[in-house]
Amino acid sequence: MNVLVTGGLGFIGSHTCVELLNANYDVVIIDNLSNSSIDVLEKLEKITSKRPKFYEIDACNKEQVEKVFKENKIDAVIHFAGYKAVGESVSEPLKYYRNNLDSTLTLLEVMKEYSCHNFVFSSSATVYGSPKELPIKEDFPLSTTNPYGTTKLMIERILADVSKADNDLSIIVLRYFNPIGAHKSGLLGENPKGIPNNLMPYIVRVATKELEILSVFGNDYNTKDGTGVRDYIHVVDLAKGHLKALEKSTNFKGIEYYNLGTGTGYSVLDLVKTFEKVNNIKVPYKIVDRRPGDIDACYADPTKAYKELGFKAELDIEDMCRDSYNFIIKNKSN
């Protein structure tokens, strides 16, 4: 089975490619390298002893995407190619609407032309907005608090409409919670360009003294220690969830939605203290003002994914902290 992975050299995309290759899928990657590195291709080969076919193209460019479908019999698409920084989406909304919507529309149009019916979409728990209760279930009301989240919700609505119009389509929407961690080899992990937008890469850079101190945004939330609580999931578990979704997509028609999380919420300080403990290193931090739009707590009810996909996260918070640090240490010495 030929699987096209857009954004396949990025953080979640590359880990998913490892799982696909190890499960003997044929993988074709497209990536424009805007937030990833060509070196990842070599690392995928090193880990799996297989080299996926790679095209350096933009998923928004219909002519280039058509070329990929023309040269390869694509059976399914897993779509990761999207901008994902919440803060940047607030300051540059047009960039996010243009890229995230265009890339999806282009893929769906080309899939239709080439009779490719299986689509797995990388969505986000941001589509739940500020949930009224916890844990979060898939049938909760949907709303957003930033342009990034709005692009995900808009795409979900487009996919629902497209699914109604085409009875051959099989669409799985995966709503991620907070992916962290890295591949245990230390070859793949999260190393964003510039100042990190997400908590774990920031913790790691403070631990390695690249950054001086971690800013913890608020300690007056309605949580056990006053800091925000999130559902952190190991990126390798998340990647395995995509294989389960792909399997599901081959034997049903329509559209389904699944939370990918652990069902457990950890606070910012839980994460910092666990990181310090497992890596035997200090992470200095200071409490600063809350960020607008941040909520007290957010964690998944993962029951539906377990019952219908057979998916359950297996790696814990210590694995996530250990693997994140291991990746950076190994890559600093290279």
Image (tube, rainbow, N blue to C red):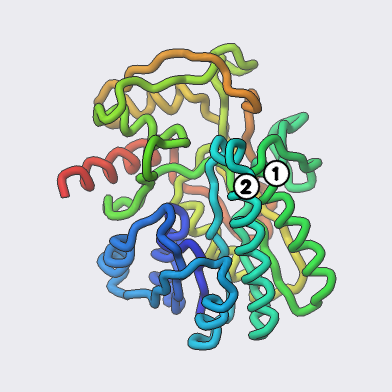
Helix, strand or loop at disc 2? strand
Q: Amino acid at mark 1?
A: Val
Q: Is residue 173 left or right of residue 190?
A: right
Reading the image, the residue beneath label 1 is: 127
User: In the orientation shown, which residue stands out farthest toward the right?
Assistant: 164
**Amino acid on which the number 2 mark rests in the picture:** Ser
Give SS at disc 1.
helix
Residue 192, how many percent across, how many down? 39, 44
Q: Which mark is residue 38?
A: none
Give residue 70's position: percent from left, percent from top. 54, 87
Write down the quadrant of residue 128 in the picture. Answer: top right
The x, y position of residue 148, in whole percent, is: 63, 44
Residue that label 2 marks: 124
Q: Which one is nearer the viewer's eye here, 22 or 130?
A: 130
Badge 2: few (under 14), some or many (20 or more) residues near its Cα, within 10 Å? many
Q: Residue at x 30, y 38 (%)?
A: 325
Examine the image and state in which quarter residue 228 appears: top right
